[in-house]
Amino acid sequence: MAVDVDTREGIRYIRLADALDIAQAAELKCALMDAIPSSQRVCIQVAAVSAIDVTIAQLLWAAVFHAKSAGSDLILEGPLSEAVDKSLSATGIYPLMASLLVRSEEEAGSVHTSRS
């Protein structure tokens, strides 16, 4: 499964894996739309993602703004693969996504604590 959702210690984790494209967009959108309004903290784990297309990049971009309007804290847990990095750069949203990127689950927890 390319999209897996789990909740631990009050944080909703959305684990993404493999190459993600329009075929997984509906599944990812559902996961994001469910997680963001129902959780104060959402961590999108992207370390196992090998590539994304523009549809997935747009969904991630929209999730950032949806989370802000819903009062949720959203981060990306990386690192990003070279292909994902290039896709985000090509779409022009890399600076926004990079500002949300942390390297580990431990770091994600400390980011949440400091932002809360």
Image (tube, grey):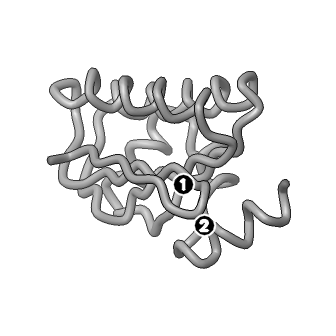
Q: Amino acid at mark 1?
A: Leu
Mark 1 neighbour class, 10 Å CA radius: few under 14, some 14 to 19, many 20 or more: many
Q: Is residue 58 above or below residue 52?
A: above
Residue 4 appears left or right of 62: left
Residue linked to disc 2: 102
User: Within the image, what quadrant is residue 40 found in?
Assistant: top right
Are discs 1 and 2 less than 8 Å apart at CB?
Answer: yes
**Which of the 4 quarters of the picture holds residue 59?**
top left
Tell me where residue 96 appears, x and y as whole percent: 66, 42
Residue drawn 29% across the image and 56% down it: 49
Q: Earlier in the sequence, mark 1 or mark 2?
A: 1
How far is disc 1 from disc 2 in space, using C-alphas?
Answer: 6 Å
Circle 2 SS class = strand
- Nearer to us in this view, 103 or 52: 103
Residue 15 location (% of width, % of height): 35, 54
Q: Residues within 10 Å of mark 2 (few under 14, many from 20)?
A: many
Residue under numbered circle 1: 76
In the image, residue 41 sits, relative to residue 68, either above or below, namely below
Q: Residue at x 74, y 30 (%)?
A: 68
Residue at image position (41%, 48%) is 14
- Residue 45 percent coordinates (x, y): 43, 57
Position of 89 relative to 32 (above/below): below
Q: Residue furthest front?
A: 9
Helix, strand or loop status at disc 1: strand
Q: Which mark is residue 46?
A: none
Relative to the observer, which residue lies in front, 10 or 103? 10
